[in-house]
Image: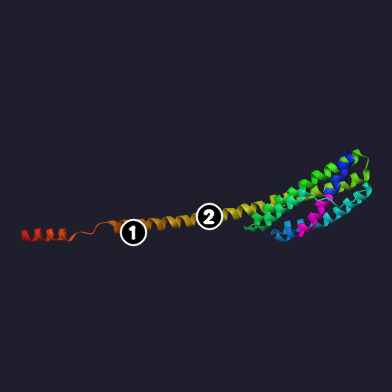
Amino acid sequence: MLTSLRDVLNDLVRDLHSAETQLIKALPKMAKAASDAELKAAITGHLEETRGQVARLEKACELLGIKPKGKTCQAMKGLLEEGSEVMAEEGSPAAKDAAMIVAAQKVEHYEIAGYGAARVFATVLGEDEVAALMTETLEEEKAADAKLTGIAESTVNDEADHEGSDDSDEPEEDEEDEDEELEDEEEEEEAQAKPAPSKSGKNSLAKTTAGKR
């Protein structure tokens, strides 16, 4: 039940704890699925940060006098399901990396919103230690989001676009071949459809020639 700002803060901190715990299980799979070396390293590095963030949340719960477990973050569950769908998709490596970055940044933005609100609530309630813990994690999440943007803009997006251009050329060649084959078939059909000279026509021609002789 939410009857005060403190209730909202407590619920939010527990929600964030659930979110980060779920993320710890998902990040190794994302790192394995990534093709770009820089993206793979960024995801692996954030895994270590996430473990530290869970520890901060548990410290915050201790300061607030609440238990961290017992709540499931449905929003994170949904975001990670979307990420799993991306990883399961067939496609070019760079295009999949680009889609994975989007999925990862959705997670970061959700966390940034959560930690930002938790910091504000803690400050209002005079929970300065909790506010400091939330601020530390908030800055890490912002940095992780910026790093993902940098990877996308420096390499992955261009590579995905290049791969897409290469793929778009192939069907055009196939279409040209199909058009040529279709034209050949039409010409062959037209040739077959032309009537052969009749025998009577040949006989008439022979008689005319004989008469002239």
* Helix, strand or loop at mark 2: helix
Give whichever of 66, 209 is nearer the camera.
66
Q: Is residue 189 magenta?
A: no
The answer to whether residue 165 is above or below residue 119 is below
Position of 15 compared to 164: left or right? right
* Helix, strand or loop at mark 1: helix
Q: Which mark is residue 188?
A: 1
Q: Is residue 145 visible?
A: no
- What crowding class fits label 1: few (fewer than 14 Cα within 10 Å), some (14-19), or many (20 or more)? few
Could you tell me the amino acid type at mark 2?
A: Asp
Q: Which mark is residue 97?
A: none
Give the dominant element type of the magenta stretch: helix, strand or loop: helix
Could you tell me the amino acid type at mark 1?
A: Glu
Q: Quadrant of residue 84?
A: bottom right
- Residue in the picture at 85% in, 45% down: 11
Quarter of the picture holding the C terminus: bottom left
Which residue lies under the disc numbered 2? Answer: 169
Q: Position of residue 82 (x, y in %)?
A: 70, 52
Q: CA distance from mark 1 to mark 2?
A: 30 Å
Q: Is residue 23 magenta?
A: yes
| Residue numbers of the magenta segment | 16-28
Give whichever of 116, 58 is nearer the camera.
58
Q: Position of residue 203 (x, y in %)?
A: 13, 61
Q: Position of residue 165 (x, y in %)?
A: 57, 53
Quarter of the picture holding the N terminus: top right
Position of 208 compared to 25: left or right? left
Q: Is residue 165 visible?
A: yes
Comparing marks 1 and 2, which lies closer to the viewer? Answer: 1
